[in-house]
Image (tube, rainbow, N blue to C red):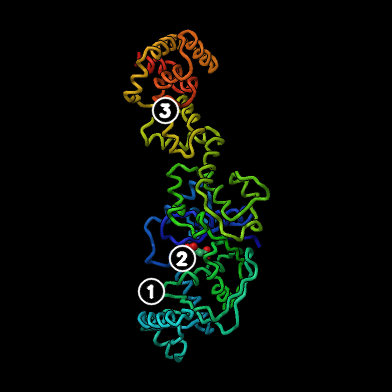
């Protein structure tokens, strides 16, 4: 049987780094083994539903170049899968468990449950349902189901323990005593995550469940459900927790931010994929930069780490700077164009835009930082009094006059020729070092430090450069 995996988010907000990691590992696994990946929206908790969450999710995956074989991105085929559209399936299946006695209705009101919980908590006991309704007469309970609000719970068997194998953690055993009679169907008739998740994984033919370690404690309940139904279990692969540098659980402040926000801040899709792939997985060698297609070949569940993965924002920045420097210039121009436009920097002069991006991409960690390095090429330059004085002093005037006169005569030139023109200006005017370079850079770029003068002229073009200098003579 071909492998089939799924990404099963609840539409409760934006896709976060952890969600992307789960989706990516599933995607990479499917690619590696030539299997399929399903997108399944787990929207059974009506109260936590967030407007547009699914649309955002889909557009984020599109931006990242991740596609699903079944699910909302696919017009035809078997998708989309929304659990809220599959209620009749869960109903059919809960009936089977009620009939077999592996599930039972519970009519206890919320206040009573709260009271029990409080008592158990005060006595420092495991917090779980006291099974009051398990003792009801079955026929009577069936009758009450018709008219009274109720939930349906699983009946945790009286065996010693539930055992399962996780590809990363190997043998995992949980004592049944510690398991609660989990609610499977809520009083609103919707299934809980646990029930819908297992029924769907089975019906959709999911062979491998890759998900975050925070779900590990739910897996025994799922394993019990597989046993009740007599279904084959998928292989479980729990991905290590994401941590802050101080090893606490990843927080919003440190980096558990919506993927969309990273994209909006100017982190490239290529970077985010590469960075997230290394959160809890390691390649065979020391290589750190991987394209998506390289990851598709390289990925192996055998190299998923057990210990938590630290989210290091400095590494993310470094990686982004590498992609900014190394991706084809056209790719960076495509990413940069909408950002430049939104900042009012025109991109229609392709020669200039190309040169501006080429300069800025070497100096910035994000597309947005590239803007800072580019603004002086587009806008009228502003000067402090100190700069104005510097530009007006005698030696600066000599430099600016000589250089601009010579420069305006150049029709074709190389950067080397401009460099020798700067040297010639120095020799002829007798001005050296900082006194030579600072006025030129100030006139051309607005700051005394910055890119080399030939590069500035290359970006601006000779006419603009001459005009900028002449403003100060
Ligand atoms: N709906 C769950 C979530 O929001 C899915 C967990 C799982 O993959 O089983 O992450």
For the C terminus, the quadrant is: top left
Q: Any atom of ligand 1 within 8 Å of the CB at mark 1?
A: no
Residue at 58% x, 46% y: name it: 292
Whichever of labels 3 and 2 marks the residue nearer the N terminus, that label is: 2
Mark 3 or mark 2, whichever is nearer to me: 3
Q: CA distance from mark 3 to mark 2?
A: 47 Å
Q: Any atom of ligand 1 within 8 Å of the CB at mark 3?
A: no
The numbered dot on residue 83 is: 2
Contact check, label 3 and label 2, Cβ < 8 Å? no
Q: CA distance from mark 2 to mark 1?
A: 14 Å
The numbered dot on residue 348 is: 3
Assign a secondary structure to mark 2.
helix
**Image x and y of residue 134, in percent:** 47, 87
Mark 1: few/some/many CA within 10 Å (<14, 14-19, 20+): few
Residue at 54% x, 51% y: name it: 276
Residue at 54% x, 70% y: name it: 217
Assign a secondary structure to mark 1.
loop
Whichever of labels 2 and 1 marks the residue nearer the N terminus, that label is: 2
Q: CA distance from mark 1 to mark 3?
A: 57 Å
The residue that disc 1 covers is: 188
Quadrant of residue 263 within the rendered picture: top left
**Vertical placement of residue 404 versus 441, above or below:** above
Residue at 46% x, 50% y: name it: 259
Mark 3: few/some/many CA within 10 Å (<14, 14-19, 20+): few
Q: Any atom of ligand 1 within 8 Å of the CB at mark 2?
A: no
Mark 2: few/some/many CA within 10 Å (<14, 14-19, 20+): many
Res. 402 visible in picture? yes
**Image x and y of residue 435, in percent:** 44, 17
**Image x and y of residue 31, in percent:** 61, 53
Q: Residue furthest left?
A: 385
**Vertical placement of residue 266 versus 112, above or below:** above
Assign a secondary structure to mark 3.
loop
């Amino acid at each position: 049987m071909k492998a089939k995996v799924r990404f099963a988010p609840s539409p409760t907000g934006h896709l976060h780094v952890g969600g992307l990691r789960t989706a990516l590992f599933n995607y990479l696994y499917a690619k590696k083994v030539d299997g399929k990946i399903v997108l399944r929206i787990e929207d059974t908790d009506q109260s936590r539903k967030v407007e547009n969450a699914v649309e955002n999710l889909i557009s984020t995956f599109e931006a990242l170049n991740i596609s699903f074989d079944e699910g909302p991105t696919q017009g035809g085929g078997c998708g989309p899968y929304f659990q809220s559209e599959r209620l009749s399936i869960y109903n059919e299946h809960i009936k089977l468990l009620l009939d077999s006695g592996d599930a039972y209705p519970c009519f206890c009101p919320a206040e009573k449950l709260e009271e029990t919980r409080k008592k158990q908590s005060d006595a420092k006991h495991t917090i779980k349902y006291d099974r009051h309704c398990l003792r009801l007469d079955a026929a009577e309970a069936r009758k009450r189901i018709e008219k009274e609000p109720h939930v349906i719970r699983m009946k945790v068997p009286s065996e010693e323990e539930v055992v399962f194998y996780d590809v990363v953690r190997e043998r995992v055993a949980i004592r049944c005593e510690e398991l609660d009679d989990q609610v499977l169907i809520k009083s609103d008739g919707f299934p809980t995550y646990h029930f819908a998740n297992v029924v769907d994984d089975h019906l959709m033919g999911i062979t491998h469940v890759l998900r975050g370690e925070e779900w590990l404690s739910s897996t025994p309940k799922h394993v019990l459900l597989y046993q009740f139904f007599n279904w084959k279990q998928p292989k479980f692969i729990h991905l290590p927790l994401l941590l802050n540098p101080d090893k606490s659980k990843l927080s919003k402040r440190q980096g558990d931010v919506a993927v969309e926000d990273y994209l909006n801040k100017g982190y490239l899709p290529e970077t985010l994929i590469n960075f997230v792939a290394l959160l809890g997985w390691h390649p065979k060698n020391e290589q750190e930069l991987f394209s998506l297609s390289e990851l598709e070949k390289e990925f192996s569940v055998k190299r998923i780490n057990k210990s938590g993965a630290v989210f290091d924002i400095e590494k993310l920045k470094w990686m982004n700077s590498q992609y900014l420097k190394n991706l084809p210039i056209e790719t960076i121009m495509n990413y940069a164009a909408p950002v430049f436009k939104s900042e009012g920097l025109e991109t229609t002069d392709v020669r200039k835009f190309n040169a501006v991006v080429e300069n800025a991409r070497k100096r910035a960690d994000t597309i947005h930082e590239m803007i800072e390095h580019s603004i002086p090429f587009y806008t009228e330059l502003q000067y402090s009094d100190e700069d104005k004085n510097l530009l007006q002093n005698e030696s600066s005037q000599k430099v600016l006059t000589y250089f601009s006169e010579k420069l305006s005569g150049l029709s074709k030139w190389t950067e080397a020729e401009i460099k020798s023109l700067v040297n010639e200006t120095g020799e002829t005017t007798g001005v050296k070092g900082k006194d030579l370079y600072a006025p030129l850079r100030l006139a051309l770029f607005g700051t005394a430090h910055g890119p080399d003068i030939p590069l500035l002229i290359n970006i601006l073009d000779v006419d603009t450069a001459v005009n900028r200098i002449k403003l100060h003579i």
